[in-house]
C-alpha cells in the first residue's frame, strides 16, 4: 500500500501561482499512475489532472487546461501540480491520488484511483 502526503497549499491572490507536491512512500512509486483531485465546499470531489507511470502522458480537466501542469519525479517518489493564473473558483482542498496500473505509458480513468492523501487547502482571493 502506498502512503501519500501533500504539501504546498496556501493563500494566493487571483492570477498568482502555487506548486503542490505529493510525496509517496511504502511501495515502488513507478508502479502507480498518479493524479490530483479537488473538492470545494459544498461540492463533490472532481478530477484535476493525471499522469502515467512513465510521466510521458498527462490529461487534465477542461477547467484547468492551459493553466495547470502535472509532472512526476520517479527518482524522488514525488508528483507535482504547478498551478498558474489561479482563479477564485480554484479554491478547494487538493488531494493527491494513486492507483496501481498495468500501463507504463497510459493515463488511467479518473474513477480508477483508490489511494488518497489527506489533502492541502488552496485558497485564491479575488
Image (spheres, rainbow, N blue to C red):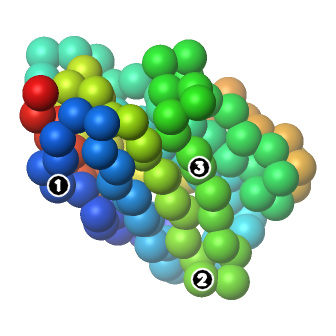
Disc 2 to disc 3, how far (Cα)?
Answer: 15 Å
Q: Residues within 10 Å of mark 3 (few under 14, many from 20)?
A: many
Q: How crowded is mark 1: few (under 14 residues within 10 Å), some or many (20 or more)?
A: some
Disc 1 to disc 3, how far (Cα)?
Answer: 18 Å
Q: Where is residue 77 drawn, in percent x and y?
A: 58, 77
Is residue 46 left or right of 108 when viewed as pictured? left
Is residue 97 visible in the rendered image? The answer is no
Disc 1 to disc 2, how far (Cα)?
Answer: 23 Å
Q: Which of 55 and 53 is in front in this view?
A: 55
Asked where in the image residue 123 lies, by quadrant, the reply is: top left
Asked where in the image residue 43 lies, by quadrant, the reply is: top left
Q: Which mark is first along the chain, 3 or 2?
A: 3
Residue ID for mark 2: 76
Looking at the rendered image, the disc whose residue lies closer to the viewer, 2 or 3, is 3
In the image, residue 42 sits, relative to residue 56, either above or below, namely above
Q: Where is residue 126 drawn, in percent x and y?
A: 12, 27
Is residue 68 left or right of 14 when viewed as pictured? right
Query: What SS does tag 3 mark?
Result: strand
In the image, residue 65 sits, relative to residue 81, either above or below, namely above
Query: What SS does tag 1 mark?
Result: strand
Q: Nearer the viewer, residue 102 or 62?
A: 62
Q: Which mark is first along the chain, 2 or 1?
A: 1
Q: Where is residue 112 drawn, in percent x and y?
A: 61, 34
Q: Residue 70 — which label?
A: 3
Is residue 76 left or right of 64 when viewed as pictured? right
Q: Which mark is first along the chain, 3 or 1?
A: 1
Point out the residue furthest to the bottom here: 75
Residue ID for mark 1: 10
Q: Nearer the viewer, residue 47 or 27?
A: 47
Is residue 78 visible in the rendered image? The answer is yes
Q: Which residue is drawn at 25% across and 21% down?
A: 89
Amino acid at each position: 500500500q502506498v502512503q501519500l502526503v501533500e504539501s504546498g497549499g496556501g493563500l494566493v491572490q487571483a492570477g498568482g501561482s502555487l506548486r503542490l507536491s505529493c510525496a509517496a512512500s511504502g511501495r515502488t512509486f513507478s508502479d502507480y499512475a498518479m493524479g490530483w483531485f479537488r473538492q470545494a465546499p459544498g461540492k463533490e470531489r472532481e478530477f484535476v489532472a493525471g499522469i502515467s507511470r512513465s510521466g510521458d502522458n498527462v490529461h487534465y480537466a477542461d477547467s484547468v487546461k492551459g493553466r495547470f501542469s502535472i509532472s512526476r519525479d520517479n527518482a524522488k517518489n514525488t508528483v507535482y501540480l504547478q498551478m498558474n493564473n489561479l482563479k477564485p473558483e480554484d479554491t478547494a482542498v487538493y488531494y493527491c491520488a494513486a492507483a496501481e496500473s498495468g500501463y507504463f505509458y497510459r493515463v488511467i480513468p479518473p474513477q480508477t484511483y483508490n489511494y488518497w492523501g489527506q489533502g492541502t487547502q488552496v485558497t485564491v482571493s479575488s
